[in-house]
């Protein structure tokens, strides 16, 4: 008997079978903002908790806050395959976790930073620089046969920029993952 979605399977799969096999990502993307004490091992415990619950963390960023003893972890997960509330309850139980917010997409500003090294020669250099200008990116390094570009924006904007650069010859890329902040004067 073949597994669901295995190559060579001819029968049609139901939506439930496809979701159960992990082959479909639906539902709301959750952006969690987690304030933690800046102590060794905190990130490992948080990532381990998600792994034990079967979550795949899509992006993960960690950085300092205005209080040097506190760090902010911003992570994104797909909440379709597993309920997010169970993992947030478990996170609250961790000693070094101070506060957790599941940020609402409409009330949140998110950004990602990315750098791309692109192969360029001759007239391609001008074309790549024009694409960069259209996306309001920056040229951060120019070599004889390559150029390094930087862009900041939504995940969709970064993905669109990447798609425009690939035909030129993408040598290397680095993306930070999302950071997020709620709109207005709400809680941190």
Image (cartoon, helix red, strand yellow):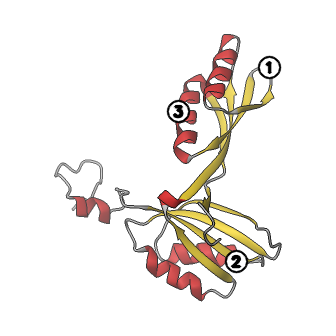
* Residue at the image position 73 percent from the left and 32 percent from the top: 138
Determine the residue located farthest toward the right in the rendered image.
68
* Left or right: where 9 falls relative to 74: left
Quadrant in the picture for residue 36: bottom right
Q: CA distance from mark 3 to mark 2?
A: 36 Å
* Residue at the image position 59 percent from the left and 54 percent from the top: 110
Q: Earlier in the sequence, mark 1 or mark 3?
A: 1
Which of the two discs, 3 and 2, sits closer to the camera?
Answer: 2
Q: Which residue is mark 3?
A: 163
x, y percentage for residue 167? Answer: 55, 24
Q: Pointer 1 and pointer 3: residues touching (CB < 8 Å)?
A: no
Residue 3 vertical position relative to residue 135 in the rendered view, above or below = below
Task: Say which quadrant the N terminus sits in.
Answer: bottom left
* Left or right: where 78 falls relative to 22: right
Helix, strand or loop under label 3: helix
* Left or right: where 1 falls relative to 164: left
Q: Earlier in the sequence, mark 1 or mark 2?
A: 2
x, y percentage for residue 116? Answer: 67, 36
Query: Does residue 3 appear anywhere in the picture?
Result: no
Camera-side residue of 53 and 150:
150
Q: CA distance from mark 1 to mark 2?
A: 45 Å
Determine the residue located farthest toward the front in the rendered image.
185
Which of the two discs, 1 and 2, sits closer to the camera?
Answer: 2
Which of the two discs, 1 and 3, sits closer to the camera?
Answer: 3
x, y percentage for residue 99? Answer: 63, 79
Quadrant in the picture for residue 62: bottom right
Q: Pointer 3 and pointer 2: residues touching (CB < 8 Å)?
A: no
Quadrant in the picture for residue 177: bottom right
Q: Pointer 1 and pointer 2: residues touching (CB < 8 Å)?
A: no
Say which mark, if any, is on residue 36: 2
Q: Which residue is mark 1?
A: 144
Helix, strand or loop under label 2: strand
């Amino acid at each position: 008997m073949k597994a669901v979605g295995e190559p060579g399977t001819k029968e049609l799969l139901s939506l439930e079978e496809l979701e159960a096999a992990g082959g479909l990502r639906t539902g709301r993307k959750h952006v969690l903002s987690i304030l933690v004490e800046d102590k060794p091992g905190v990130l490992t415990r948080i990532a381990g908790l998600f792994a034990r619950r079967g979550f795949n963390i899509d992006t993960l960023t960690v950085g300092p806050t205005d209080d040097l003893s506190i760090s902010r972890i911003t992570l994104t997960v797909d909440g379709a395959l597993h309920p997010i509330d169970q993992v947030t309850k478990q996170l609250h139980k961790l000693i070094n976790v101070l506060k957790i917010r599941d940020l609402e997409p409409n009330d949140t500003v998110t950004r990602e930073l990315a750098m791309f090294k692109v192969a360029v020669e001759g007239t391609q250099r001008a074309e790549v620089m024009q694409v960069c200008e259209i996306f309001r990116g920056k040229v951060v390094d120019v070599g004889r046969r390559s150029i390094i570009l930087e862009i900041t924006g939504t995940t969709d904007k970064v993905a669109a920029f990447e798609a425009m650069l690939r035909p030129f010859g993408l040598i290397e890329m680095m993306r930070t993952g999302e950071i997020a902040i709620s709109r207005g004067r709400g809680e941190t």
